[in-house]
Image (cartoon, rainbow, N blue to C red):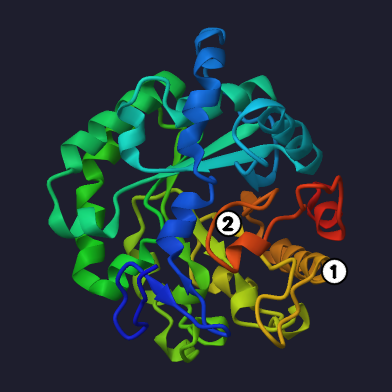
Amino acid sequence: MDGFNFNRFRSRFTFKRPTFRLSFKTIAIGVAAVGIVLVVSLALKSKQSPPKEVYVNPYETLVGVALSPKNYEGEDFNSFFTKAKELGNTVSWAGPWQEFSKTDNAAEALMTRAKQNDFMPVIITGPTIEEVQKGGYQTEMAEAIGKFVTVEQPKYLGIGNGIDEFFLDSPELLTTYIESIKETLTRVRSVSSSIKVFATLQYERSSGLNGGLFGGESDESKNILKDILPQLEPFDFIAFTTYPGLIYKTPSELPNDYYTKIKSLTTKPVIFTEIGWSRSVPAEGYDGSESAQAEFIKKFRDQMKDVQPKIQLWSFLYPQKVKSPFDTMSLLADDQETSPSFEAWKTK
């Protein structure tokens, strides 16, 4: 996997073992755990589903996981929804906007399954940094996403994933991105004014925290949230992905205001579309364990009493074929029915 220079943000992160190589863009797209293969396993089921209807949010708080079964075929796929139901009421899918142009596409299939299993689906897509740099995709993306929302009418739709990366490439690129999605936003809002639209920011990266397993230096004076958040007026939510175990060795090191300080930066509702901590040691000196996951979840939830997010999504239910250390962040191993972190994440 290509490396990433933290002094110039492009499409790859670098940290070594203790430096790993990862891309939050790749992880964010993959947090749905290669959801595109969903099409094959669900195509026939999707065709047999009842007519589409508007899905009304029956929940006060949305808690769940990203689509992350043991595998995407057979009983393992079916059992994912049964097990995820023990945790909460929400499942997310993330993938490229081009997927919406396909027949029996993955996002539509998840919408069908979510409705059948009484989940609130959260759909995340948007242009890549390369697309924003090059341009020329705006109308095609608006048509693809517009067609999807007309049929499915999702209540929660992300049209951008890791957009802080655009600002870190250049502040002008974030402006270009916001301009580029206006056509899509117009199409979406013409379908339904109740659709909640957002774009995600990577919390650690945006906060200037590039130390720890990232292999760089943490400098909170380089926090760019104060520069980015005022530009996100077109969105209904401020959305974050967060993996503090890449910065802090133990959950006890997590500052008591790590998340609560978000409230001083924005008056918009906040959501978390990816949350993770390792269930096994990612590097020497780091506490990666089921008990550490559970301890982090407790600290996270304690701070959420002040933040009051509308959505909380753990990254994976079961291990996925993604880059280390994200392959260690599931709540369950393939052979587990429960774990301390699984029990801690359950909607109380």
Report whether 71 appears left or right of 167. right
Q: Which amino acid is tagged 1?
A: Ser
Q: Which of 287 and 334 is in front in this view?
A: 334
- Return the x and y of residue 31 as percentages of the image width and height: 53, 51
- Return the x and y of residue 142 as percentages of the image width and height: 25, 35
Mark toward the start of the polypeptide (1 vs 2): 2
Secondary element type, mark 1? helix
Q: Which of 34 and 128 is in front in this view?
A: 34
Residue at point 70%, 33% (across, down): 76
Q: Which amino acid is tagged 2?
A: Glu
The label on residue 274 is: 2
Q: Can residue 190 be seen in this view?
A: no
**Quick one: quadrant of the N terminus?**
bottom left
- Return the x and y of residue 329 as percentages of the image width and height: 67, 61
Q: Is residue 323 visible?
A: yes
Q: Which of 333 and 274 is in front in this view?
A: 333
Residue named by callout 1 = 291
Image: 222 above or below 80: below
Image: 143 above or below 2: above
The label on residue 195 is: none
Residue at point 81%, 48% (across, down): 346
Image: 265 above or below 66: below
Secondary element type, mark 2? strand
Residue at point 75%, 41% (across, down): 88
Report whether 227 appears left or right of 112. left
Residue at point 57%, 14% (across, down): 45
For the residues labelled 1 and 2, the Cα–Cα distance comes to 19 Å
Q: In which quarter of the image is residue 185?
A: top left
Residue count near mark 2 (Cα–Cα under 10 Å), binned few <14, some 14–19, many ≥20: many
